[in-house]
Amino acid sequence: MMVRVVCTLWRTSVKEAKLEPLEAGCSEQQRKLGLENQQRLEKALALENQVWTAAHTANLAQHLTNQEEITAKMRHELVNWLMHVLFKSCPGVESCLYLTIQLLDLFLANNAVARNKFQTLGVAAFKLACNYTNVSCHRLSELAWMTDYSSTEEDITAMENVIHNQLQEHKNDPNPIDVLPRFSQAGNLEFTNHTNDGYSKSSSIMLYFIDMALLNETLVHIRPSLIAAAAIMCTLRVLGRSDWSAQLKHYTTYTHETVAALADTLIANGGVCSALLDNTQIANDRAGITWAIKNKYTSQRFGGVGDVLDPDGKTLNDGCLHMLCDCYENYPLTAVPVSRGP
């Protein structure tokens, strides 16, 4: 009954917006997948509206303001390290990464953290996120080893319990992955869900720009759905397509102007790709120390095949990071005219 109600309301809203249904002319299997993604989208947006109150947003916006020992650079380094740990430990489970960072930032927003406990906080948030998302995690002894034993097993367990007691109500908070499948369909982009093989080219680009958002401490308070929408816009720009449409406005609920403001920031942050491949020093610390990004987005899972050279010494690798570098070097990644849709 609920499926029927959702389907009816969704089709009615599309009709009222004078848009072509996304599944028009599709197979039965594609229509079923579209309905599942639509239900997931509506559930995520409803939950996001409950969680992302004005008070929640304001609290996250000042997550580093009251920290006496933790700086933005330290957060950047820890998030970068956690990206590396999760990519090596839980490849393809991006939702676990997003929850880890959400727990980290929420804890910082509500607690003063000592410098010598900061990595312990990150490791404990990772372990807890694995538990919440049913992802296999390292043993405590391995987690302690990852920190060069600066965090003992007892330290990690104690911190995990503190985080759980404070933040367990946030274990199901929405994240960008919850809305990306439907947003991608609205943008006519292929999106690959959790996979043991590899991501599509467009999926890799979207996830790259979401990671750029995770590394930027000034974007912690931004709604996950807006982060996802901006990642879609950035991907469309990279692919040389119109970066917004009437369908994207309808399904994301965001205007072009709202999304473009964030997309411009992510595009600017994403420009580190050329320096990463060239192994040059990056002056901007906020965008620097991103070796984890290089390892992740030159991996085979994200379209990389290694730096294979042709006889002339030209790189043949067309993985995500290489393709992004080509775009940054050869084309201005600015807005292109908005498609008004059917």
Image (cartoon, rainbow, N blue to C red):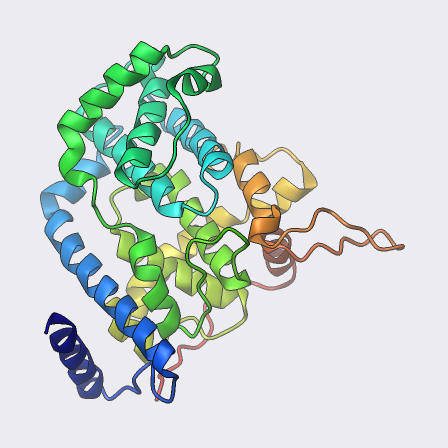
The quarter of the image holding the N terminus is bottom left
Q: Is residue 120 above or below residue 216?
A: above
Quadrant in the picture for residue 76: top left
Left or right position of 35 against 297 = left
Residue 6 lies, in percent from the top left, at 15, 74
Q: Is residue 141 above or below residue 39?
A: above
Q: Is residue 68 visible?
A: no
Q: Residue at x 44, y 77 (%)?
A: 337
Q: Is residue 134 above or below residue 75?
A: below
Residue 192 lies, in percent from the top left, at 45, 61
Left or right position of 225 against 9 = right
Q: Is residue 255 above or below residue 62?
A: below
Q: Residue at x 11, y 76 (%)?
A: 5
Q: Residue at x 36, y 84 (%)?
A: 341
Q: Nearer the viewer, residue 283 or 46?
A: 46
Q: Nearer the viewer, residue 137 or 300?
A: 137
Residue 29 lies, in percent from the top left, at 37, 77
Q: How many marks?
A: 0
The quarter of the image holding the C terminus is bottom left
**Residue that sits furthest to the right in the current view:** 311
Quadrant in the picture for residue 86: top left
Residue 100 lies, in percent from the top left, at 32, 35
Q: Residue at x 81, y 51 (%)?
A: 309
Q: Is residue 232 visible?
A: yes
Left or right position of 11 against 93 = left
